[in-house]
Image (cartoon, helix red, strand yellow):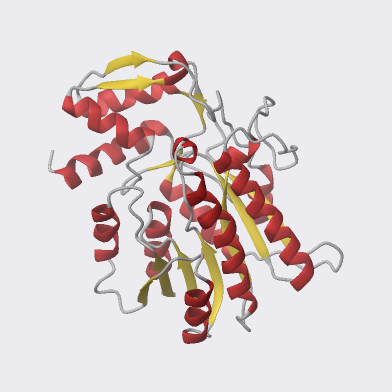
Amino acid sequence: MSVLVTGAAGFIGFHVTTALLARGESVIGVDNLSDYYDVALKEARLARFEDEKGFTFRRLDIADKDAMAALVAEFPDIDRVIHLAAQAGVRYSLINPYAYIHANVEGQLVVMEACRALKNLTHLVYASSSSVYGGNTKLPFSVDDRVDNPVSLYAATKKSAELLAASYAHLYRLPMTGLRFFTVYGPWGRPDMAAFIFAGKIIAGEEISVFNNGDMERDFTYIDDIVAGILACLDTPPADQGTQGPHRIYNLGNHRAEPLMRFIELIEEALGQKAKLKMAPMQPGDVKATYADIESSRRDFGFEPTTSIDEGLPRFIAWYKDYHGV
């Protein structure tokens, strides 16, 4: 039996694939290597798997229904799917909205249709986002909260993916779980995210934009904790109770809201260099604070994050300096 990982060349997909291979799994990885950010970074991640006998890679677009149908026909022994491929980023959704519908809505549909053809499928785990909480002001964010007020197209597409999954779980009894990730960071991270951007600009002596004049909080979650949660969830598929479909939603976060200014200070300390701050207003589609309620994740599959930003950010900076030869 094999695990299909979509977005295997991406940040989270790379780490999930690494962890699956480490526990002896056979992994089929797919990715379209989009140029949303530096393709060389994605290729460097994939290069780490070159000598792994348990890893097979196919370059394809998960929204290409013919390519996905051919993939599952080629690998009929796939019994679990971790669907992480997506068009990420709130701000880019203001620039290229069509990319989000293509990857996050059409892509979700195509992946689920491919899963219907897998006779041995036991669980589809897919990535959602804390962005679905949108304009909610009650903290921490609970999976029981209403999420009807998206403030970005990215959030709307992730909520759409959850609704599509719920309908397919009901219609076809496909066991599915959506995981709402909260601001994931760590080694091999995405260049469009705060830790990566801040580190590069501080080293270069350039100004960093601090939105909402620094009055922001994020539930920063270290990559190792996220991966542990994904695998624990994968191993615990939802039961089919016979009424609603076997579909669940969980938060995966660090269960604490960290001030943005403290996040910056820890990066400064790890680099041994002060940042040049440029205070800026809140950006369209952004939110002031995120904070995950993880009680259901703890209860159902033992999720327990252990890495604070005091530990995680120095690890990220050490990797960043090594990768860039700083």
Residue lying furthest left: 325
| Number of numbered discs | 0
Question: Which residue is depicted at the point 54% across and 61% down?
Answer: 107
Q: Is residue 280 left or right of residue 126?
A: left
- Whether residue 270 is visible here, answered yes or no, is yes
Q: Which image quadrant is residue 120 in?
A: bottom right
Q: Is residue 298 above or below residue 117?
A: above
Residue lying furthest right: 243
Quarter of the figure that contains the C terminus: top left
Where residue 218 appears, x then y in whole percent? 50, 29
Q: Is residue 259 left or right of residue 208?
A: right
Where residue 315 appears, x then y in whole percent? 30, 40
Q: Is residue 27 above or below residue 188?
A: below
Where residue 192 appears, x then y in whole percent? 36, 39
- Whether residue 235 is visible here, answered yes or no, is no
Q: Is residue 207 left or right of residue 17?
A: left
Where residue 52 appears, x then y in whole percent? 29, 74
Q: Which image quadrant is residue 122 in?
A: bottom right
Front-lying residue, 204 or 256: 204
Question: Which residue is depicted at the point 49% across and 82% down?
Answer: 70
Q: Is residue 41 left or right of residue 301?
A: left
Question: Which residue is depicted at the point 18% across and 22% down?
Answer: 205
Question: Which residue is depicted at the point 59% across and 41% down?
Answer: 155
